[in-house]
Image (tube, grey):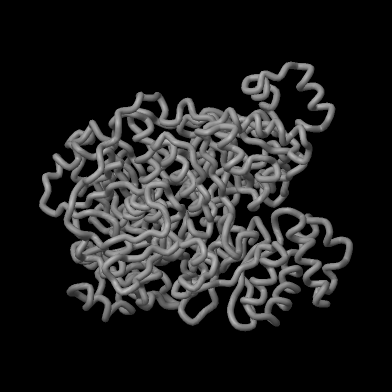
Amino acid sequence: MRVLDLTDELARQGARLLVGLGADVVRVDPDDDLDEAARIHWHAGKKLAREADLDALARNADVVLESGPVAKLRGLNADGSSRWPQTVHVVVTPFGLTGPRRDWTGGDLVLASAGGMTWLGGKPGGQPKPPPREQACQLAGAHGAIAALLGVLAGRGQLVDVSAQEAVAATLETGAISWIHAGRFPVRNGGVYEHVAHRIFAAADGYVAGGYSGSERMWTGLLAWLAEEGEAGDLLDERFADPVVRWAQRSHVDEVITRFVAKRTAREVAEQGRARALPWAEVTPPAELTGNPQLRDRRFFVSIGGTDGTEDAGFPWDAPGLPRPVTLFPLAEGTWTSPPQRPRTAKARALDGIRVLDLTWVLAGPYATKILAEHGADVIKVESRHRHDPTRFSPSMRLRPDAGPDDSGYFLNFNRGKRSVALNLRTPDGQAILRELAAQCDVVVENFSPGVLAKWGLDYESLRALNPRAVLVSMSGVGHTGPWRTAVTFADTLAAMSGLSAETADPGEPPQGLVFGLGDMVAANAAVLGALDLLVRGEGGHVELSQLEAMAATMGPAVLDRGEPAGTAAHPNRSRHAVPHGVYPAAGDDRWIAITAQDDDQWAALRDLAGLPGDGDLAQRRAAEDEIDAALAVWTRGQDAEQLAARLQATGVSAAVVATGRDLVEGDEHLAARGFYQRLTHPLAGEVLHEGIVARLSATPGALTSPAPLLGQHTAEVLRELLDLDDDRLAALRAAGVTE
């Protein structure tokens, strides 16, 4: 696949992910402003056509991936159409191509704030802060890459609109949907998950991430461990067997665990946790990633050719187009060497005619299959009362007051557009039916522990015998091979192992971790890309995805970059690349605004508007940064954040409100104008808003077609349609407890 890379920071990750799939990527800008580590990370494996005819390159590309502020895009005509209508032209902008804020600018901090992610990070009473390593831009880039493959599969040239703000807003877990379903929103608390009992604990020599939510075994296994060491205390009392009691007394339970962890080294806790199949992991800094035995065993790291053994973070998959071990060479002169894509039959939606068997639960898997459903795939979700998906059955994850399994707010948002088949996979008949369903599907997505599918006769070799063209997407925590392959992971443990959690620490202070499942959704995006890649190739295959590798691949140049962070405990949002760059108080209780001067022109405009001290270039501003930040905070403190952001943007300065879930759902005129939150009518919950679609394809748009299903709502319908079962057979299966 030929890709013309016209990206800036907003979508560099998208172009890099396409390199990881084996795409033939040509770039026209050498990005000389980047330092060496960043330039190697973002552009190794591409070719540089420095003086080429842009229109000629675009005409010969299958995909043009472009990003930046609308005013600086090179591929749009004056009327907003694409200059290159014959190709799949993906445009990633800060706020999208339509709406009242289409001309607003912003980098990672502003977009993380506008999209609701900054609000979730930081300490109580302190500045909100986004996740490290430019996760807002990396999410936007990943959705740009997904959009590119969807466009190719759709079989026609078109313009694709990806808003970085919406890419973030779709990745908050409960950050906004708590407001939709319960009239409240999470608040930053220094890294303690609000809806699951997970957090970072201090060990004797470092930190670990872990907890006791999920299946009941997560609790009973941890309790047995504490009891063996004689440190369970009153947690052995019968009342703590009730998850409702545990949740109500979480602070006490955490105190007991805190004392237990503090007596042990971080490595000891992590190793014992893995041995006991419990979700615990050491908080590892990025500089130590290359020593991770799991990542090394799976040949995750990329070798940079022409250097003396330089290694960089790799890609989320072992892709057919770029199999491991991978060696990439730095950006060098060249152009296409691959043939263009063959013409495809045009479709109304990109994935029309694709059937997906969804064997996933909780977040990473359902988020991936949700994206496939939005773009036309028939997603058949297999679930059961015998294997409780916490998002249906756990009271803490239902969000809606008095909700039950069929109207859990969490489940509704991430499972819309799917059909539900109730199937008890503990029974031989249930397993047999599962195999028959798999034989009728194009894609099978699962996130079971390694080895489970093999017991049911559905490992990849068995699936290929049933259905040679099927794509199997496996989404295990750390992969199906390697010394840690049996590790149980949650989003917080993946963030800890990947290096991300370590970088949430303010200088000289403990890591805070994240309070939403960013790692799950990063892994979901990677799973979608892996599946779409094989569908584009028109061949079956196994996407053996490690969620750890997907997360580590979003650490940017962290493995190569040994520079000190610019932030301080008092100013955690500072950047090495811009001054000022921070979150400042606004009028009202706990109201904030993100402001960045991305270049000298923005600085001059901000200085004149706010009456700030100082002058000169970035280096001179850096020397006066404390003074500038103090004066800026005094100026912003009494002003309305929304009005001030609009004033700043009108003068060309990047700024945005640090949005809460309520701001996004009810107060954001731009998201409202673009129809980001969409209403579906559910048989029990009634009319409910849902987070919308990120990749907006002009010719083959996606759609939210139906609400999330009731448990087993489509069992009879699907088994009749796909397996031709009659009423007598269906009744016998129900009576035997197979379809419940």
Picture quadrant of residue 144: top left
Query: Could you say which is closer to the camera, residue 732 or residue 558?
Result: 732
Above or below residue 485? Residue 468 is above
Query: From the viewer's perspective, is 413 left or right of 667?
Result: right
The x, y position of residue 482, in whole percent, is 57, 62
Query: From the viewer's perspective, is 711 left or right of 243?
Result: left
Query: From the viewer's perspective, is 582 left or right of 390?
Result: left
The x, y position of residue 105, in whole percent, is 29, 53
Residue at the image position 49 percent from the left and 44 percent from the top:
665
Quadrant occupied by the N terminus: top left
Query: From the viewer's perspective, is 446 left or right of 643?
Result: right
The x, y position of residue 464, in whole percent, is 56, 37
Residue at the image position 50 percent from the left and 31 percent from the top:
377
Res. 295 visible in picture:
yes
Above or below residue 555? Residue 58 is above
Quadrant occupied by the C terminus: top right
The x, y position of residue 607, in whole percent, is 23, 68
Q: Residue furthest right?
A: 238
Query: Could you say which is closer to the camera, residue 67 or residue 397?
Result: 67
